[in-house]
Image (cartoon, grey):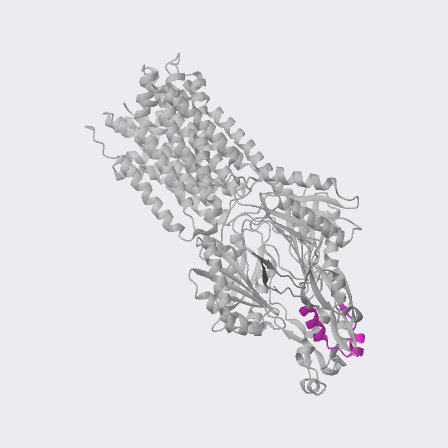
Amino acid sequence: MSLIKYPIRNYQFTLIMVLMIMVVAASALLTMPRAEDPDMKPVNFPVIVVHPGTNPKDMEQLIVKPLEARFYALDDIKRIKTSINNSVAAFFVEFEYGTDYDDKYQELVRELNAAQTELPDNIYSMEVKKIDPTNVSVIQLALVSENASQSSMKQLADKLKQNLEKVKALKEVEISGLPDQQIRIDLDQAKIAELGIPMNRIVQAIQAENQNIPAGSVNAGAKSYSVKSSGNYQDIADINNTIIASGQGKNILLKDVAQVYPSFGTQTHITRLNGFQCVLINAAQKVGMNISDTQVEYQAVIDAFKADLPANVALIVNFDQAENVNNRLSGLGIDFMIAISLVLITLLPLGTRASIVVMIAIPLSLGLGVIAMNAFGYSLNQLSIVGFVVALGLVVDDSIVVVENIERWMREGYSRFEAAVKGTEQIALAVLGCTVTLVIAFMPLVFMPEMAGEFIRSMPIAVISSVIGSMLIALLVVPFLASKMLKPHEHEGGNAILRGMQSLIHKSYGVFLDKALKHPGRTTLIALAIFLASLALIPLVGFSLFPPSEKPQFMIHIDGELQDNILTTDKITKQIEQELKGMAEVKYYTSNVGKGNPRVYYNMQQGGEDVSYADIFVQLHPDVKSHEKIALIEKLRKKWTPYLGAKIEVRNFEQGVPIISPVEVRLFGENLDTLQAMAAQVEELLKNTAGAEYVNNPVKSNKTDIKVNINREKAMALGVPTSAIDQTIRVALAGHEVGTYSDPTSDDNDYALVVSVPRPQHASLATLTGIFVDNVAGKAIPLQQLASLEFEPSPANIFHQDKERTVAVNSFVQKGYSNDEVINAVIKQMDEFPFPAGYNYEMGGEVESREMAFGGFGTIIMITVFMFIAVLILEFKTFKSTLIVLSVIPLGIVGAVLALLVTGNTLSFVATIGIVALAGIEVKNTILLVDFTNQLRRDGMELNKAIEMAGELRFLPIILTSLTAIGGLMPIAWSSNPLISPLAIVMIGGLISSTLLSRIVTPVVYKLIPPKIDTAD
């Protein structure tokens, strides 16, 4: 019994299998993880080294060069970027994509620890940080109050954090906008000087008293008991009663020379929501969780917390990723239903019963795809859903072809059983070949390297799983359904719609094809000319990597002038807030001054800590359309460029692999002054390049430091050690952390013990000039007597890439210009740039991302082409048939390029993927035509007649399969998501041109190079 007969004869078994597929697919769909975007796992680590009081040049020599040499000795290193600032060196160590994350982290930690013997002794901290790409906030909450104290806001934020941490699906619950808790110990310098107590003695006394030293254990009988001695401070009274000196029969206590009280540290991160002071709470979701289910859990926590809030505090959910995901999935669900409806319309010529068979086959095919996706561990995200929508237009093809062929056999007088078996067997090999070609077409996307491949992979996996499922359903289930549901038509030509279309095909297409076959050379030349003309349009279309996001949100970056303090930055931020306040489109604007907004988007990193920097996260009302958002962004860019006292950048969120900016010129060389001068020239070059905006030069200006020049001879004469001067300055300006106080009444209330002098909230120059330093005798000496203050220029930053000094000057691209257009203009100018000997440049930004995304892709495409050819030769056993089938691919490129040009889209990464997928669909349709032509000739039909008959008989099923694919893609094409709509536009344009042109060109090419057919077979 043949494999096709088995499910027909054993229909009970087949029915149970069909029901099982439906149940398992429904279960998988409901339980598989849901997320907005695919998970990406780059193996990158920041390494932060802090060496206080060290300028960038000394940091470079003492810290950076030894560590870079060690890091480069590690295996699988891809690139190391280093940013060197005053007192801080930040390394960004990037390993080859796909290496083990945890192993590489341990290697870096071991190497850093081993390097300590080569580094200065007084390094404050060295740390390898983990960047978890899944740590994107799924929710951002704001506790807002106009009059609540910092202490009460801290208590509420801590309580909310604890409650959210109980939600099992959440992780990394973070609080922003509150300074650290401290126990401040403000010293009375006059009193200390009067008593003759050196400041370092006070620091040592506090540190000695606040130690928890294990006392050991004692045995008593058969048991052992641990002995606890004094331990840490138990309350503030203990701190106040610390003995700092003794003399003349009495102890001098800390409270005699200092004020001890709980407080908060200096405000270095200010947060506001819609202009009101607030505390932000952000939380990320654990990998593999369903965000819709997670939302239900944390929403219950939020509702319960709101009910117990005091009247003067409000809790606002100002960002909820679940809403975005649910809206996107809902929108794609609607698109899916529209696609189903359009597919149904295209099935009308088959008749009601045949259409029902096909409509049953569609969810079964997609169901097998869902089952496979869930088994492979993929989530339901925007890319995998797009894969299923693309698959919708493909999975219907096999069923249409099988059903149409079965009906044709029934019209010739065969019974339903015979027609189901013979009709399926006749085209089974062709269906198998079509499926293999489709799998091969999408397979390169599965093996794409780097983050771009990780980002896109769920889409081709969804398509491949579904089309393989479609083949199985078409060959095993559809014959069973057809044998039970189809019935002979009253008219041998089929229903009225089918007869009408067949008549139209014969009268129009048949006549046109006959004329083309009489002039095959001329027809082929015309087709070739059309193809070459379309290639000439590609430069007009332009190229870009990934489009901007369609989400109704964007970010405003505020860069104050070099060395602006946080008060100045905050003042500018408030001015921007006032302008946002009156905009009807804006729902929320969340300000972060002194630090970037917590990460709320997959390819956006949080900005670093810098008092001259601020972020404003702007969220628009959900009904604001994508084009309205773009218009608003352009309006704000023009309004705030330039802006007095700061550089304001309004940035849309970008799709795809994260890059700092699309246009980036990296300069390499040794001399810092030369690099700075060249960077200034490149900055002007970018500013004068049409289409470039937001030009950023990180070494535009040197910073000015205040250098304390200690008169060492004088200090020695007065008995003042230089270490005492350094420590006193630190105590006066930043405070000196001497330990930690843990409140025994709370589980999560640790306070830093900070010794300082009374000062305003933000230290000023007056604070520095008013410092007194103790000599060894305890006498207070004015700092001005020991040292002079000098303003000293120094590099603000030094940058390295792969151990070389570098400067990266970058810019964004204005609306109305393509990234490719601006990048090419910059490259042309840089190639003519007068570089001194030993200096060179490279392009970063989108150029580099493009190389990473398509690195090795050419090899994959080459392998794919050979696999295409191998499968076709295996099926047809002749090179001529293979060439005839492949000749259809250029015809699709014609429509793809025209569709991009007409719709104003560029040839983006996703559009390129659409062209690759299009090739598979085109080949699939052509296989059916060539295979049928070969069959007719094998049965003894003359060449021209076989070509014409095959063209007419296969015209309708090929048109129907193309129309169903187009119908399935239409909702994506007109969607507002710029990431996926170009893919659908390319495929629709290509399908239209290839379907129409190939109905003429393929038969003509077949006549020009007819394959040899062995009629004996």
Magenta span contains residue 202: yes
Residue under the image location 36 percent in, 50 percent down: 859
Q: Position of residue 251 (x, y in %)?
A: 77, 73
Residue located farthest toward the left when viewing the structure as drawn:
1016
Q: Is 752 located above or below residue 435 in the figure?
A: below
- Figure disc tally: 0
Instruction: Please state which of residues 770 and 509 is positioned toward the viewer in this rendering.
Output: 770
For the C terminus, the quadrant is top left
Apparent side of residue 950 relative to residue 895 in the rendered image (left or right) = left
Q: Is 966 located above or below residue 424 in the figure?
A: below
Q: Position of residue 345 (x, y in %)?
A: 49, 24
Q: Is 873 located above or below residue 666 in the figure?
A: above
Magenta span contains residue 363: no
Secondary structure mostly taken by the magenta-highlighted segment of the chain:
helix
Instruction: Please state which of residues 180 and 365 is positioned toward the viewer in this rendering.
Output: 180
For the N terminus, the quadrant is top left
Magenta stretch in the rendered image: 186-208
Q: Position of residue 180 (x, y in %)?
A: 69, 59
Q: Quadrant of residue 78?
A: bottom left
Apparent side of residue 173 relative to residue 197 in the rendered image (left or right) = left
Q: Is residue 484 visible?
A: yes
Instruction: Please state which of residues 344 and 264 is positioned toward the viewer in this rendering.
Output: 264
Q: Quadrant of residue 663?
A: bottom right
Q: Position of residue 92 (x, y in %)?
A: 52, 61
Residue located farthest toward the front when viewing the structure as drawn:
221
Q: Is residue 730 visible?
A: no
Instruction: Please state which of residues 40 and 635 is positioned toward the viewer in this rendering.
Output: 40
Apparent side of residue 738 relative to residue 988 in the rendered image (left or right) = right
Residue under the image location 76 percent in, 76 percent down: 246
Residue under the image location 38 percent in, 27 percent down: 474
